Image (tube, helix red, strand yellow):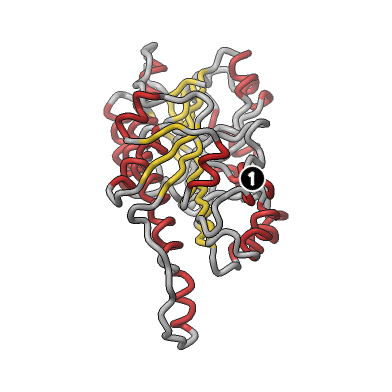
Amino acid sequence: MAFHILASTRFFDAEAERFLVDHGCVVRRTGLPAEVQDDAIDAGDLDRLLAGVDGWIVGTARVTRDLLVRHPDLKVIARRGVGYDNIDTTAAHDLGRRVTISPGGNEPTVADHAVGMMLCLAKRLREGHLAMQADRWSPLVGTELCEKTVGLVGFGRIAQAVGRRVRGFDAKVLAYDPHPNQRAAEAVGARFVEMPELLASSDYISLHLPLSEQTRHLFGRETMLQMKPGAILINTARGGLIDEVALVEILKSKHLMGAGLDVFEGEADPLQRAQIKDLIDLPNVIASAHSAGSSREGLSRTNKLTAKTVLDLLNGQEPSPQCVVV
């Protein structure tokens, strides 16, 4: 019997779809334009798409208890990427469904993005571009990444990839993690320190923690004031790690040189866009729309990994260690 798979996430490519089809699956698509997230599908259409589906490769659509109850055939819900805030995992566990994420595919992409933001801010590329557009050609004085200190808050696989990259700039790497992995630190050439030392010593701080009640607004006003004057803050993890109102104040005060932000606390809520605009209007901010993991190569790897994970679980096999069952 063929498995029926709904792939509703954006940018699910033809190669990943062909992989499923070649393994006997029937793949359904939403027909949405590439720029539209699957949370735009209304409830009735989503129910029709999910009818008789065994596995769902989901984007940002809400996976609620009621929806899972309505679709008893649905056995696997797979998120391409890391976050799964849109999935009621408690309900999924209660109902015997498997929920997976695929963090392994876009690690190089996110790490490249974080380092790219460091360099853009250090060299003041946005400010220089805006000045030239206004016909001001005086050079701006920036700083270097070479031989600086980079602090990594959270030391999972993406943070480790950032550490490896900045070592190419002869940077010193500090790390803080509630569960330090000494072997990984030795491989990267990083040294674990407590948070006060990391804050005071780092020229660049890059955030790589999950969002939880313990980490929400971890970087609030007082924490950011403990950062080294002139430091640069990078966040490619979760928007809620930073108090964005406090960050506006800190950046305007010039205590920090700049911030590179791929994620924002209210990015999914149009009513909070005004607060985000206050940030991205600042000349010492580089912003991207939660796109750090979105390269052609990263999406291709993650699509294939997610497709294989769904197929493995439906066949009663455990997935690759690059995937996580939550």
Specify whether residue 189 is in view: yes
Query: Where is residue 109 shown, x and y percent of the image?
Result: 36, 46
Q: Secondary structure at mark 1?
A: helix
Q: Amino acid at mark 1?
A: Thr
In the rendered view, tell whether residue 28 sits above or below residue 99: below
Is 118 or 307 nearer to us in this picture? Answer: 118
Query: Where is residue 80 shown, x and y percent of the image?
Result: 45, 35
Q: Residue at x 34, y 24 (%)?
A: 183
Q: Residue at x 55, y 49 (%)?
A: 263
The residue at the far bottom in this view is 135
In the rendered view, tell whether residue 26 sits above or below residue 138: above
Query: Where is residue 258 shown, x and y percent of the image?
Result: 53, 60
**Residue designated by label 1:** 223
In the rendered view, tell whether residue 133 sits above or below residue 279: below
Specify whether residue 58 is in view: no
Q: Residue at x 43, y 73 (%)?
A: 141
Residue 114 left/right relative to 247: left
Query: Where is residue 58 shown, x and y percent of the image?
Result: 50, 35
Q: Quadrant of residue 313?
A: top left
Badge 1 local density, few (<14 within 10 Å), some, or many (20+)? some
Q: Residue at x 39, y 59 (%)?
A: 119
Is 259 or 189 nearer to us in this picture? Answer: 189
